[in-house]
Amino acid sequence: MYHLGFGQDDLGSPPPTLALLSGDPQRASQIAQDYLQEGRLLSENRGLKSYLGKLSNNRPILSATSGMGAPSLSIVVNELVQLGIETIIRVGTCGSIQEYVPVGSIVITRAALCRQGAANDIAPIEYPAAADPFLTVRLVEAARELGIEHYLGITASVDTFYEGQERTDSANPYLIRRLQGITREYRRLNVLNYEMECGTLLKMAGVYGFAAACVCGVVAQRTAGEGVIVGEKEVAVQRAIAVAIRAAENVD
Ligand SMILES: O=P(O)(O)O[C@H]1O[C@H](CO)[C@@H](O)[C@H]1O
Ligand SMILES: O=c1cc[nH]c(=O)[nH]1
């Protein structure tokens, strides 16, 4: 595969049909090293690290990198599906929009408000960005079993970390009118969190015919400020990974 940098022949027998997909290549490594058996690097191309390993039930699994944002994710997901991947769990980070969703907890997406340009190349804007219900229930069950504080709900997937998530403490303090007040509006609409890949992933799943779901560790609390709470990020990420791994182990 041109962008992933590996192909069918690298995947062994039986090949994996399941992938965990992280925005951050470091997280893809962490999953392979700390949570998979026999994890080995398949490729590192354009910063996209991909690992092959096994779950505790011996099932093969990929730990891959989407990169940040929907355009990069769309390329990676397309190539993963060409390689036979049938189930994708995004393991991400996010910013909370609701006061009751604290930093350190996790958000499991049941559907996404998809404000992403790349998704419009794949399906009409009205096309639903819905998570696979069975996979999503697996994530919720995993969080319950592991005793991890979790919230199930709607995620806002947008194209920019700063302007699109209504951040003004950045190189661009000016927000165009349609983004001024958008976080408050989403809060009122019961949207739980902001991130940058899930909506496009879920639309691709509907169109291509694979199962997808998303779990994100909360690293920012947008009712309190704009910044990422770096000191609590690792805990949030580890919780999201643990839940994704447990859910993956229970996929049929
Ligand atoms: O931590 P990851 O998976 O990259 O996810 C979130 O973090 C990045 C922004 O900091 C975006 O990709 C966003 O979706
Ligand atoms: O606030 C945040 C934190 C992580 N990722 C995002 O997209 N937004």
Image: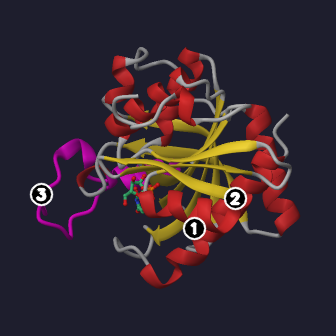
**Number of disc labels:** 3
Q: Do the residues labelled 2 and 3 touch (CB within 8 Å)?
A: no
**Percent position of residue 175, x then y:** 17, 53
- Residue segment shown in magenta: 165-189
Q: In this figure, which colouring scheme has been used for the structure?
A: secondary structure
Q: Which residue is drawn at 40% across and 37% down?
A: 4
Figure check: 46 above or below 11: below
Figure check: 85 above or below 97: above
User: In which quadrant is the N terminus drawn?
Assistant: top left
224, 103: nearer the viewer: 103
Q: Distance between the residues labelled 2 and 3?
A: 44 Å
For label 3, the crowd category at 10 Å Cα-Cα, with few meaning under 14, some 14 to 19 and many 20 or more, is some
Q: How far apart are marks 1 and 2 (CA)?
A: 16 Å
Q: Is mark 1 within 8 Å of ligand 1?
A: yes
Relative placement, left or right, of 236 versus 27 is: right
Residue at which label 2 appears: 36
Front: mark 1 or 2: 2
Q: Name the disc covering residue 174, or none.
A: 3
Q: Which residue is drawn at 79% across and 43% down?
A: 59
Residue type marked 1: Val
Residue at which label 1 appears: 237
Residue type marked 2: Leu
Mark with earlier residue (2, 3)? 2
Residue type marked 3: Tyr
Q: In which quarter of the image is ligand 2?
A: bottom left
